[in-house]
Amino acid sequence: MDRLRAAGCVFAEDEAELLLATARTPDELAAMTERRIAGLPLEHVLGWAEFDGLRIAVDPGVFVPRRRTEFLVGQAVGLGRRADRRPPRPAVVVDLCCGSGAVGAALATALGRVELYAADIEPAAVRCARRNITPLGGTVHEGDLFDPLPTGLRGRVDILVANVPYVPTEEVGLLPPEAREYEPLVALDGGTDGLDVLRRVTAVAARWLAPGGHLLVETSERQAPLAVAEFTRRGLLPRVAASDELYATVIIGSRPEGTDHTTASPSP
């Protein structure tokens, strides 16, 4: 604990307890402590992160799920439970930019019977997500956004969550060293205004959603007005949900009933 505190770890006592509980031998504890002191994120040292009450496997080089994203999960769970699917069937859930698969795993756990798919462009993230999602009956695909998903999902998705990167490029250097040095840049950098990937998702989301289906994307409070405008431009009915406690902002876009987007032209 003293060594962690000297290295600048704010929650040294809590971290020391987690390291002690996870290490199987004194040598392993010493090695884990050294990695943490060197600046490796605690979750990468432990090999897991706590997220929405679950222990999620997180490998080195994989984006660490943030606690604020639990708010997105809560919003998605509420929508999934309120949906009136006729005839009754499992909800079709897609987790884009899935990283470790934490969001998809949390949704599958909370909603029970779901048809779950996830995708990420990072091979390390895909390997990690499979460890978290496959035991829950889900499948994980490697590729860019919607590209690797089965085409049979078009027009069928009830809950589409996309934890897209939304840090503006010029602000990536201001992130804590744990993030900018040990997490993949593709999971952090959202382009000039932070909304590049969000725009790519909303451009085609409606053709993947079922009538009455929902797209949920995390963003910042500052970016919310631009994100809402993008949702509206793409034919989704948007609303903003926010949590002061978790400092989280989520844009929720619904595909109106009776609309047909499945034959729209491919995105750029």
Image (cartoon, rainbow, N blue to C red):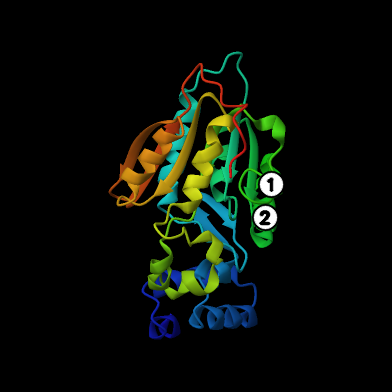
Q: Quadrant of the N terminus?
A: bottom left
> Image point 58% across, 14% down: which residue?
86
Q: Quadrant of residue 228?
A: top left
Amino acid bearing label 1: Val
> Image point 47% across, 69% down: which residue?
179
Task: Return the x and y of residue 26 as percentages of the image width and height.
Answer: 61, 81
Which element is circle 1 on?
strand
Residue marked by disc 1: 140
Q: Is residue 38 above or below residue 163?
A: below
Cα–Cα span, label 2 and label 1 = 7 Å
Which element is circle 2 on?
helix
Labels 2 & 1 near each other (Cβ < 8 A): yes
Task: Return the x and y of residue 57 as percentages of the image width and height.
Answer: 61, 58
Judge whether residue 168 can be spotted in this image.
yes
Task: Return the x and y of residue 132 as percentages of the image width and height.
Answer: 64, 50
Upstream in the sequence, badge 2 or badge 1? 2
Residue farthest top in this picture: 87
Task: Return the x and y of residue 235 as percentages of the image width and height.
Answer: 45, 30
Residue marked by disc 2: 126
